[in-house]
Image (cartoon, helix red, strand yellow):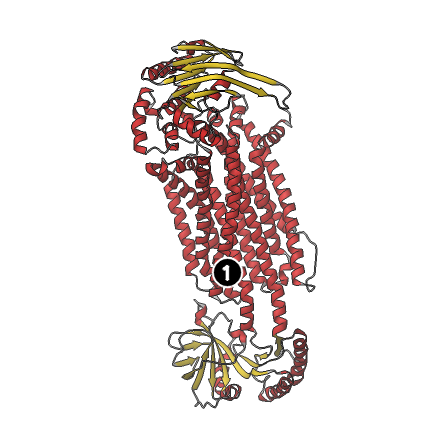
Amino acid sequence: MNTVFYPKLASEGIKKNKKTYFPYILTCVLSVAMFYIMAYLCDAKIIDEIPKAESLKTLLGLGVWVIAVFSVIFLFYTNSFLIKNRKKEFGLYNILGMDKKGIGKILLFESGFLFAISFVSGTVVGIAFSKLFELSLIKLIGENAKFTFSLSLSAIIKTFVLFLGIFLLILLNSIRQIRSSSALNLTKSANLGEKPPKANILLGILGFVILGGAYYIAVSIESPIEAAIWFLVAVIMVIIGSYLVFISGSVMLCRLLSKNKRYYYKKNHFVSVSSMTFRMRRNGAGLASICILLTMVLVMLSSTGCLFIGSEDSLNNRYPRDIMFNASTSYRNVLSEEKTGKLRSDFDTAAKKYNTKNNGWDYFEIYVSGLLKDNGKIIIDSENETVYSFKDIVTLHFISLKDYNKMMGKNEKLKSGEALIFATHKGKIQKHYDISGLKIKTVKKLKKLKINGSSNVAVNPNLFVIVNNLSDVTNALAVKDENAEDPLISYNYEYAFDTVKDLKTQEKITKELAETARKAVGYGNNVRLTVTSAEQEKNDFYGTFGGFFFLAVMLSIMFLVAAVIIIYYKQITEGFEDADRFLIMQKIGMTKKDIKRSVNSQMLTVFFLPIVFAVMHTAFAFPLIKKILILFGITNTALLVFTTLATALIFSLFYAVVYKITSNAYLKIVSGKNS
Amino acid sequence: MSLLEAKGIKKVYRTRFGANTVEALKNVNFSVEEGEYVAIMGESGSGKTTLLNILAAIDKPTAGTITLGGIDFSGIKDSAVSAFRRDNLGFVFQDFNLLDTFTLEDNIYLPLVLSGTDYKVMRKRLEPIAKDLGIFDLLKKYPYEVSGGQKQRAAVARAIITNPHIILADEPTGALDSKSSDELLRQFSSINEKGQTILMVTHSVRAASHAKRVLFIKDGEVFH
């Protein structure tokens, strides 16, 4: 047999079955493009320009995995109904004398063609869109970003390997199916209803168990870092669980509904339930795919929306004063009283010149972190201890009573060993603390303290401890510090004041103060001097977090488009299948109104179920998202609730529009073949 | 008064641009009495399918009236046609027109479900019909699991379960082997003996020979 025979049969097969192959190729192209874009963004230099790029990259990395798993399951199932339609043709070849090996060859060429088309066009679409992302991002971030037009070879290779693998798996599965059935069965199979999978109930239970496990993970994780890691596991579990539940659930639902005679033999249910039963597995898989894409969009939009809106909120927390100075060192002698005194008087002069409100702060602190035990014991050199929760790590700021009284305009008095305590996080303040040997008695809990804002947005609790004499603290803790490998204690001088809210002015003050500080403390590696202005920070923050939000919106649009296309083509292909049936039913006496009603009842299930599950998934993902957002400095739960609800609402409206369009298209097809 | 009466039925088809006209039915007049079993015979192209389509309200005549039980339905509104068909007519098609998505039982129930009949009533009606037609044991099977003759018997069951005024059968034996054909025709006769009016269109002499009255159609005209 000549060598072009099989390739020709394969390409003819694709051409002849355009109606079913086109949607399939489209889904393949979309999957390839989605995966490429994710893989590309993971490596893209542009992402480094966004603050918290590391966390973002971790999340994008998770995204790559999620899309990979999704693509495997999704393509597998879309292919399964494709092959069903082709079996008849293969059966005919078989009867005409082509052996199974020959059919395998046709399938091989067919998969090869499909892979080539999908990979090439998918990558091209992916590259085009990733460039579009990049250019828009650069526009948002501004001129600081260096623009390089690059293709990511590694992303292309990753895409190639993944999809080659998927197509191979699909091919093997098709060959297995062809091998195990006789020629006669092959010719009949297109008309055959789907048989329910044998271990259906078991699969369903397994699906629920996996979903439950994922939900448990989402709800029970405590620490933000762990949340970020387990997020991937939970997401993949949700994907697998959803597919199992939807597939076996749809089978079970169909059985249950058709067993309930009173429900089943009603005009509106009869036709829709029976055609859902006819393709119950495929239906389940389609619904699960839609559900997962919807969930991704919901999660992404609600969390980044919250991140964006919350950034203002968190900015005010983080930068409560316009101009903030911080000097930090690990060496006790660097920030001597003499040097801090010099800094203080220089800054006071500067502040007098620019200060519009007298509400700044000015203190020297000893800063140390430790492990908090139940009885008020705090261990600062706890290198061998395992930390279970972020709540157990407490950061202590020791401030002298003198600084406190001056700053707050008070006249408190303390004895040695007594302290005033201020806590940034809610939680119990102990009566007594034992900080690696330094014993402290709480005499008063403070309600208010002017402090550097970064402790407000810290993940773990911060305690400000006002003591009579700081040398007590240094004396008690210095020994531990000297024995430790890395310095445990740092010495900070903090100064801040408000001024006019103008970017230019604040930039000028920042420069001036940096110079003043350098002169007062002297140059050197042992001390770090930073001056920040709120306006500058806000400027950066918005530009870049805007980019972040933009990225999420773009990805959401991509997923959404994928979901819409799946829904649309699912209904269109089913429409063509159903058209003949509706024609027969019209002959028997089904009116146009009946058709419309029965289509609506069927559509409602198709549309309703995925969004219900998507909202449920999102609800359970909520605690996880909340914790991951803490990593980005967002602690406002009410805002997250609001953005989640708002996205869900906007989304449902959008979904309703898609529903209307799709059901109209479907209706047009099924009632088009008119009597 | 006759059950079904066709008067002066005319059907003219126009070719696409209206240049030529084809007269499929010229002037058809005939009537069917209640309880009759009538066959309309004709070669292919004689206009018999056109006639049946008009009788079934699937197509509209260019001129003429048809009355069923005294009601003229040649001018019936499109939206009411399906319901009219469902409530008054039973159909048996050459290619069965059973739905793959339903079992035979559900296929038979379909017209009743469409007219909103209670399940218990449907069940009661089905049992004797299915037993008479010899498909009672096959009710749970799907169309692709049974033979052509069995499919057609299920289609007959579907046609008579609504107690229609008249059954319109379009070449019911056209897709069947001779044994199945004979069996189906016997069943038609026995249904007719119970009082069911049947109008069958066929080109097979053998099928027509079972009917009590045969009309011939040729070049768009019916001869008695």
Residue at 65% across, 46% down: A124
Report how many numbered discs are placed on residues in the image. 1
The percent position of residue A77, horizontal first and vertical second, equals: 50, 40
Tell me if mark 1 has few (under 14), some (14-19) or many (20+) residues whose alpha carbon lies within 10 angstroms of its own.
many
Question: What quarter of the picture does the N terminus of chain A occupy?
Answer: top right
Residue A570 visible, this orientation: no
Label 1: which residue?
A: A643
Residue at 47% across, 20% down: B65
In the rendered view, tell whether residue A283 sits above or below residue A304.
above
Position of A335 compared to A176: left or right?
A: right
Q: Quadrant of residue A279?
A: top left
The percent position of residue A424, horizontal first and vertical second, equals: 47, 75
Q: Nearer the viewer, residue A104 or B89?
A: B89
Which chain's residue wears label 1? A
Residue A16 visible, this orientation: yes
In the rendered view, tell whether residue B59 sits above or below residue A567.
above
Q: Nearer the viewer, residue A32 or A7?
A: A32
The percent position of residue A114, horizontal first and vertical second, equals: 60, 37
Q: Quadrant of residue A345?
A: bottom right
Label 1 sits on what residue type?
Thr
> Which secondary structure lies at badge 1?
helix
In the rendered view, tell whether residue A571 sits above or below residue A483.
above
Q: Nearer the viewer, residue A674 or A125?
A: A674
